[in-house]
Amino acid sequence: MQVLNPLAIKLNEQLRDAVPAVFSLLSELGKRIYLPKGILSQTAEANTKAHRFNATRAIALDFSLDAGDMMHLPVSRVLVPELSLENIYSYAPVLGQQTLRETWKTHLLNENPSLAEKTFSLPIVTNGMTHGFSLLAELFVDPGDTLILPDKIWGNYRLIFQTKAGADLQTYPFFNAMSGFNTHGFRETLANATDGKLLVLLNFPHNPTGYAITRTEAQQIVDAIVACADTGCSILVIIDDAYAGLWYDVAVMHESLFGLLVGCHPNVVPVKIDGATKEEYAWGLRVAFMTFGIGETPMQPLEQKLSGLIRANTSGASQTSQTLILEAMKAPGYAEQKQRNYETLKVRALKAKAVASDAKYAELWEVYPSHAGYFICLNLKSANAEIVRERLLTEHGTGTIALGETELRIAYSCLDASDIETVFAAIARVIKAL
Ligand SMILES: Cc1ncc(COP(=O)(O)O)c(C=O)c1O
């Protein structure tokens, strides 16, 4: 067992005093991690006081034209001519550009009416959403800790939380008999957990099905979490909002569950992971956000710990990528362009649903309810999903994703609306030919 650094001890005490639930959720690494005083703090001090020469930053400056521009290669600079040198080449702050963080917070408030008047942190910028989940695994998961999630999930959770962090995954069937979210199974799984510490992961709009919850289901989920917290259990509730905003059905809730969870119980620590990745159509830029549903006092030590973890790993997200997202969000055509993409995806989503649900396919597959996001998912009635996937690829040049024995995920986000009928007809042809 490593001896704790005095700075780590101080952060732990601050967390314990501010929100005991956060402290009791920390992993052993989470308890050990801290942000060393040193280069970052000395640089920050010099940035305000070194008015003659600042020889602290680990960057290179060019004085040939001016009083110190970022040294750079003009061949790459011409590719992004409108951005300042600093906003392309310089290091971004460890937790992300301040203005981007504030802009994303405003975005969250605009999109989530339930967050009005609630206390939640300034979003922390991560290097894509996967990085955010990895940070949570490091900060909160010890081998053997229980993570509750449904049986239908984005597969990377397993790699991050089970394979890497050693969490014990407990699952419940995603759907109930009415093809709604299985709030009963969720509640039972929580009620059966005996640990004093629990991690829960929820993702709506859902990958792989495209399912989104109703407001009633959302309230039932919150009630189940509160009932579990009432027994004295500390619960980290991780909300994966990768596809936030992409709701196409008026019957479902058009905001994040995060807003309903913030402040629901002192033992519940909600954290929202979302990002530019899908919402802003910027998959490869690797800009995402991690927002905690807790106040400023516990956030200060938590930010120090997360800064320590980020410093020890990716050391912050790309400055250029953050600038691109921020500038896009400030640009005059931003809202209109986003709406255009949303409308395009909505047309595809509704068409995919209508075509896949045609009575002529009823004997071949069941269509899981899909209201949002990028996907629709079929549960094949007699065929093996992997065989269908392979035949579709070799005989029809059509790529889909096989999940388990019987499920086939179709990303209509990647299909022109006019091709959707052809794709489902090909799936039917392959199944019938088996
Ligand atoms: C539900 C869900 N969460 C997170 C991610 C990953 O996001 P990122 O590419 O930002 O790591 C994906 C990507 O497919 C996803 O489907």
Image (spheres, rainbow, N blue to C red):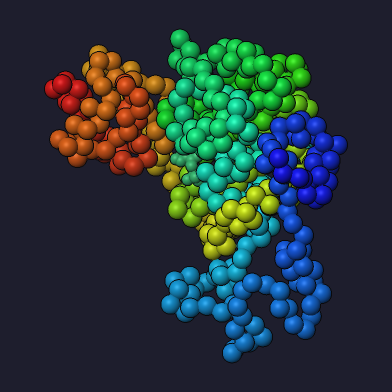
Residue found at the far bottom of this picture: 64
Identified at 70% across, 17% down, the residue is 228
Residue 101 in the image, given as x and y percentages of width and height = 66, 52
Residue 61 in the image, given as x and y percentages of width and height = 61, 80
Identified at 82% across, 49% down, the residue is 6
Identified at 78% across, 49% down, the residue is 5
Task: State whether residue 235 is above or below residue 131.
Answer: above
Task: State whether residue 400 is above or below residue 52.
Answer: above
The quadrant in which the C terminus is found is top left
Is 411 left, or right, of 302 in this rendering? left
Is 244 left, or right, of 145 in this rendering? left
Residue 383 in the image, given as x and y percentages of width and height = 24, 19
Residue 34 in the image, given as x and y percentages of width and height = 73, 50
**Displayed quadrant of residue 327:** bottom right
Along the line of sight, which residue is nearer the eye, 104 or 172?
Answer: 172
**Displayed quadrant of residue 263:** top right
Q: Could you tell me if residue 187 is visible in this image? A: no
The quadrant in which the N terminus is found is top right
